[in-house]
Amino acid sequence: MNNAAIRYSIRPLSVHAHTFEGRCTVASPDPTGQCFSLPAWIPGSYLIRDFARHIVAIRAVSGSRPVSLTKLDKHTWQAARLKHGESITVTCEVYAWDLSVRGAHLDETHAFFNGTSVFLRVLGQEELPCLIDIQPPAGEAFKDWRIATALEPAHGEQHCAKRHGYGLYRAASYDELIDHPVEMGRFALARFVARGIPHEIAITGQHDCDMQRLTADLKRICEWQIRFFGEPAPMPRYVFLITAVGDAYGGLEHRASTALLCSRNDLPWRGMKKMSEGYRTFLGLCSHEYFHTWNVKRIRPAAFTPYDLDRENYTTLLWAFEGITSYYDDLALLRCGAIELQDWLELLAKTISNVQRGPGRRRQTLAESSFDAWNKFYRPDENTPNAVVSYYAKGALVALALDLTLRNKTNGAISLDDIMRALWQRHGKTGIGVGEEDIRLIAEECSGLNLKRFFSAAVHGTGELPLKKLLATFGLKLEWVAAETPSFGVKTADEGGQLKLTTVYDDSAAQRAGLSAGDVLLAINDLRVASTNIDKLLTRCQPGDTVKVHAFRRDELKEFRVRLDRSQDDMARLVADARPNNLRRRWLGI
């Protein structure tokens, strides 16, 4: 029996008030005043979220004696001095109404939490092992709730949990504790084994998912990725925690699981013959988060080794950990046979188009986008498309360009695949953080090439990537197509029947005319405009035409004269040669 120095318990306190009760008991607290803290952010989502703001009550006792707590900052408390040998228990009530993959959510249908939202960190004792007692909500209505988590039951303990049951679970440290989200409720459950590793799929919410189809598709994806990095896989088991709702999309990676949020319509249904676009996108999300099991959960930036949970952790490498992962997520679907070549070409063309349409690619480098993720990419506003480039999307294109450059210049002998496996051996398996220049240095060492110019231009520059030339070498033709309508130069959203400008692009027709984000369009050439007819109205115009636009700015009616531009050639289309060459066969695996 291993009595952990830190003991936690968690239970749904009120499904109607959406509150959890979390307890933390420390056997040997700092007698001068033990400090407790809740993380300011959750690894994998690079934004200060201040989870402590959801603590609605907190108290401490030693035995039956109350212990005073002094709040030191927004998320840290210090207990009063204790006598040597006295333990302390801190209890907090946490509000949980964030239906996302990042926080905690509780109602009468289910409970979900990340440890960063509910488990206090015992400062100075983060490396000690933990026991976690997961308790059910009170009431007969919840007696059939189960637990889905990658946490390991605390074998050897008297109240050890059975798989999917309540009771004691174990974590080797606080870092491990917060890296295992927990789902409680009534969920559909499926299992499969991939290269010897047990996997589970737990789906919460109303859905009609074809579990057999989903299981088969995820198995082939997981097996391909395990073979890609090399067996054995680094986790003893893996859990897909899926919440199906009306309309949502998101995922967050963990060391042995992932939390996913999706539209129920994106899941496969029984009798589905052709793969839907939504299901294809969902499989890409699953592939993306699973690839993170290696790339970012174990191959990590030096800046994340260890995580500083109190403040921003800055690195210029998010383009590699998210962008390279974004490159491989759909590529893995193709290589494992989950999708066809045409599907993959459409997905890649969409990524190319999205990057090309963003003026921000000319203003911000990938390194800058990575470094500033905390206050730019994760805090978007109306000007974000003009000022920010996505380290996901452009990062994926840089990964593509690097892969094709390596394959082309080494005649297929070396590829990005080799670089990722080298990173796994040197950094993932050893736990040594990846330095800011290490990816380039390893790529140069493996290939024998000088890649300083490539990285300087692609990662630290804002120029165009030579994708057309690179893809042509591999038998893929990149074509650019313009929209048929003249360009207004805006993004819009239908808000309560009003057509609102959400972004006005730099140097666009709308910007030159004086329109601004937040303006509500009323009419074009004296005809009422809405989301359903704006394209029809513009189709009847030619580039160079001047149209009269009426709009509200706040509560003031404005009139503008907009001289329409020609639409840019920013819609990518990829066409594959009928007969693939050897380079393409070795690259795509088909």
Image: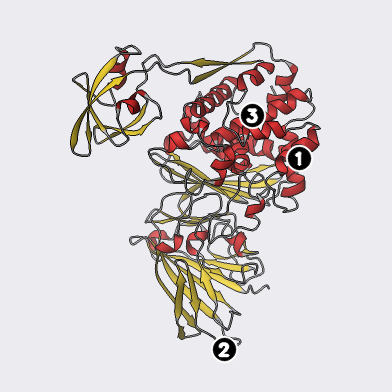
* Mark 1: amino acid: Ile
Q: Secondary structure at mark 2?
A: loop
Q: Residues within 10 Å of mark 3 (few under 14, many from 20)?
A: many
Say whether disc 1 or disc 2 marks the residue closer to the N-terminus: 2
Q: Residues within 10 Å of mark 2 (few under 14, many from 20)?
A: few
**Label number found at residue 400:** 3
* Pick the front one: 15 or 209: 15
* Mark 3: amino acid: Leu
Q: Is residue 271 visible?
A: no
Residue 142 location, x and y as percent?
41, 59
Q: Is residue 66 left or right of residue 84?
A: left
Above or below, 141 against 397 in this view is below
* Pick the front one: 77 or 191: 77
Say whether disc 3 or disc 2 marks the residue closer to the N-terminus: 2
Q: Calculate the distance from the C-alpha at mark 3 to the C-alpha at mark 2.
A: 61 Å
Q: Is residue 316 visible?
A: yes
Report the residue marked by disc 1: 442
* Mark 2: amino acid: Lys
Q: Secondary structure at mark 1?
A: helix
Q: Quadrant of the N terminus?
A: bottom right
For image coordinates 54% across by 60% down, the residue present is 165
Report the residue marked by disc 2: 83
**Label number found at residue 314:** none
Residue sitting farthest toward the bottom:
83
Residue 267 location, x and y as percent?
48, 35
